[in-house]
Image (tube, coloured by chain):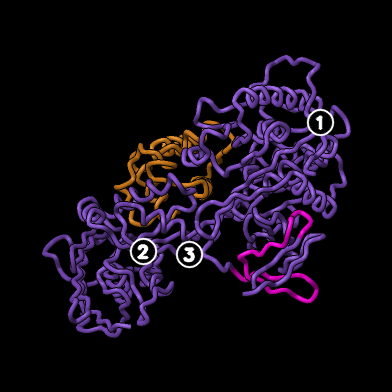
Chain colours: A purple, B orange
Amino acid sequence: MNEVQFEQLFGYQSDQAIVSHTDRGKISFVQFKYELAFVANELKKTIVKTGVTKVALFCEDSYEFSLLFFAALSCTQSVVIPANNKRFTQQSFGKETLLLGDWANKSAFSVDIPGEYEEDILPPDYFTAEIQLFTSGTSGEPQIIVKTLQQLLNEIITHDKKWPSRIANTTILATVSHQHIYGLLFKLLWPVVSGWSFVSKTYVDIVGLLKDASKWSPSVWIASPAQLSRRISSWPWELGKSLTRIFSSGGPLQEADAKAIYDLCGVEPIEVYGSTETGGIAWRNQLRGKQWNPLEGVKVTEARGGLLQVFSPWLPRGFICQDRVKIYEDGSFELQGRADRIVKLEEKRISLTQIESLLMKDSYIVTAHALTVERKRKAIAIVATLTESGNKILENKGKSFLVRQLRESLSRDLDGVALPRSWRFVNEIPTNTQGKITRDLLMQLFDVMPAAMAPQIINSEFIDSNGKVEFTVNSDLPCLTGHFDASPVVPGVVQLDWAMHFGRPLLKAGSAFSHMEVIKFKQLMMPGDSVILALEFNQEKNRLTYSFRSVNDSGIEYSSGRLCFGHV
Amino acid sequence: MKELVEELKILIIDVLNLEDITPEEIVADEPLFGEGLGLDSIDALELGLALQKKYKISIDAENENTKSHFANVNSLAKFVSGSCA
């Protein structure tokens, strides 16, 4: 029986209770009931007329979403909740699915509430449709996860017991979207079940959130590490004292961020660990401990391969996650990384396999390998070999043009966060002596020199085994500090490092540095100098000859030498 | 204004760690987000933080105008110089 009664779903004690703060002002429960009745009525007419049984719902605004969501649950068979409303997503639905909400499609059904209501229409008595959510599967193709409303409610009831609000008129504010399971549960379903109000917009501005949290206190912030980790101390954090709780989910919060948030607004962030497939699994408060504690009624065991297996009241059967786990005697556990090729960036689950297979469909790419690299933020990097047409673009239009083309074509299918930011185009993918491609070998291609350590490039040109890099020695280079105070010069060792850094693309895959020859330092290189670095790689001898010369005057040489390599 | 535009291009490359892109390759009136440079929502957060720190300006992300300020480098420069004045 997958039928949820109206009274089970909505916990508002009076008609005057506030359901939502929207851009139309406060919406009371009585008004919400009228509007839901109206939308459900209109939707039903469309459903009868078109004969569709399945709808796909996307809405920026959580209140509008709620009207369409509950209406659709009452009069269709399945409600699909995609993560975005991109064209690619829309195309994947086909004609048998009615689009609801914000879509770039004129035939989409959207909310248009009239100023006056007929008093005699009533909201639906019960809600029956299944709910479909998406997750990125191991194969890379998004997978459909089917839930019943009852399953979601079972989880809500557990959270509500664990973290009861002492005060009835709590307001939920969120920096996450209801289009994902965490937001759907915490931002939307929890408040309606508990009879609290939710703010219909998704905040991007923390200052605005803090102000509203104080205005509508007591309040709860449904957050994720992306926002909790990006703070400015001058924001009015003292207003955060009106928050009774802060939840974070989607990915692990750094311990330092949890502490900082506590110091700023006196609330200990509670993290919830879970997935679209499983719903919530466990929670932790990093100010009290690093280990995860299973939610009430949830059983966690270690399956074959050290994988986490979960049984819970909101799962029809046990589910094996792709997270490796270590379970302690007291039942708490620690996560030890993913077992598959899914990575998580900024709370988004990203399939490296999917990125690779999309790239390999591109006419410029033969093979592609995706990996993550740590920059200022963790990002996707690609090592790829190019087709003839790809190589032509690289030679004629340059790397940044090619990268832009590839990113543009990927952006039709991928979220912005998943778009690769570092690219290396090679003649062959480096392999070790066993012929295997390892992450370490690929990582070698991504130079570790931070951008701030390299000089300001004016121009660079690489043809076959030769390279030319023109740059100016900018005065804010970190190597100049203290070397020397009165008259800063570029240290010789830094020049060697630059030769290595800029020369790396010319080297053979898998080369390892062995020694240097004929190193000469002739002139001091100083801030403001314009310099040309000439590089030549000798394939046979496996060595890189470099020289730094002045752009001006007679082209005086600063330094030169040879870097010699062996093969691993 | 021209100086500020160049300064912002360098800031964008620096803050967002953009590889393979020189300031000259950022066209001042092409979109920063979505198409064009193809920045994402996390970049918007980072860029917003960097501008607030560097120029001591406040950015009201809920304000509809903010979106248009972040449209491209030119509009950003106008916004920054207007806010600092």
Please give the residue where the numbered disc 1 appears in the rendered image: A125
Query: In the picture provided, is A558 more to the left or to the right than A195?
Result: left
Q: Mark 3 falls on what kind of element?
A: strand
Please give the residue where the numbered disc 3 appears in the rendered image: A374
Subunit of label 2: A
Q: Position of residue A265 (x, y in %)?
A: 73, 52
Examine the image and state in which quarter residue A56 appears: top right
Q: Are marks 2 and 3 on the same chain?
A: yes
Q: Earlier in the sequence, mark 2 or mark 3?
A: 3
Q: Position of residue A221 (x, y in %)?
A: 71, 47
Q: Position of residue A400 (x, y in %)?
A: 31, 52
**Magenta stretch encompasses residue A315:** yes
Please give the residue where the numbered disc 2 appears in the rendered image: A383
**Which image quarter is the N terminus of chain A in?**
top right
Crowding at dot 2, Cα within 10 Å, few <14 / some 14-19 / many 20+, comes out as: many
Q: Residue at x 66, y 34 (%)?
A: A65
Query: In the picture provided, is A354 more to the left or to the right than B61?
Result: left
Tell me which segment is drawn in magenta: A312-337
Q: Please tell me whether mark 2 or mark 3 is closer to you in this view.
A: 2
Examine the image and state in which quarter residue A187 appears: top right
Number of labels in the image equals: 3
Amino acid beneath label 3: Glu
Q: Are marks 1 and 2 on the same chain?
A: yes
Q: Nearer the viewer, residue A229 or A60?
A: A60
**Magenta stretch encompasses residue A539:** no
Query: In the picture provided, is A157 more to the left or to the right than A82?
Result: right
